[in-house]
Amino acid sequence: MAAANELRAGGVSQAYDRARLIELFGDDAAVVAEIEREFLDTAREAAREIGGTDDLERIAQAAHRVKGASGMIGAEGLRQAAAAVEQAARARDLPAVRRLDVGFSDEVARVAAQVAAS
């Protein structure tokens, strides 16, 4: 689920806006790296929670957490994926949640790859 306005660095699409993190938290590399790790941990935990339960309320809450955090750091693809999962969970549509979870997990993997490359 790629965002229409993906950021690019060196021709590679970016999963989140690292410049926004620097703008929000300063240009201390250690601080930015810690924020990236914390965000990634949150996203990975949500992915495990979404994939590991049929409890639609828990799924909606996990997706909502990631949606908000993603919006803050400019992870538009992940924000959109989380919003779609949350909406499906709130609509009580578990088959849709399972279909959408693939895109959600793909976006988490994109974030992980960018964090690893930073």
Image: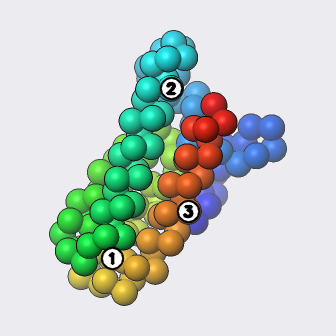
Within-10-Å neighbours for mark 1: few <14, some 14–19, many 20+: many
Q: In the image, is residue 74 above or below residue 65?
A: above
The secondary element bearing badge 1 is classed as: helix
Residue at the spot of label 2:
33
Residue 77: tell me if it is visible: no
Q: Give the distance between the C-alpha atoms of the residues marked 3 and 2, in whole angstroms.
A: 21 Å
Residue type of the residue flagged with mark 2? Ala
Disc 2 on helix, strand or loop?
A: helix
- In the picture, the quarter occupied by the C terminus is top right
Q: Earlier in the sequence, mark 3 or mark 1?
A: 1
Identify whether 19 is placed above or below 61. Answer: above
Residue at the farthest right position: 11
- Quarter the N terminus occupies: bottom right
Vertical order, 19 against 82 (above or below): above
Q: Would you say residue 55 is visible in this rendering?
A: yes
Q: In this view, does 111 lie to the left or right of 47?
A: right
Q: Where is residue 25 in the image (x, y as percent from the top left)?
A: 43, 20
Name the amino acid type tagged 3: Asp
Disc number placed over residue 88 in the picture, else none: 1
Check contact, mark 1 vs mark 2: CB within 8 A. no
Instruction: Tell me whether the residue at label 3 lies in contact with that at label 2, contact meaning CB atoms closer than 8 angstroms.
Output: no
Question: Residue 17, image x and y in percent?
Answer: 57, 37
Of residue 26 and residue 33, the one placed in the foreground of this image is: 33
User: Which residue corresponds to the image point at 59% horizontal and 52% vertical from the top-left?
Assistant: 110
Left of 34 or right of it: where is 94?
left
Of residues 95 and 48, the one nearer the viewer is: 48
Query: Of discs 1 and 2, which sits in the foreground?
Result: 2
- Nearer the observer: mark 3 or 1; the answer is 3
The residue beneath circle 3 is 106
- Label 1 sits on what residue type? Ala
State which quadrant residue 11 falls in. top right
Near mark 3 (Cα within 10 A), the count class, few <14, some 14-19 or many ≥20, is some
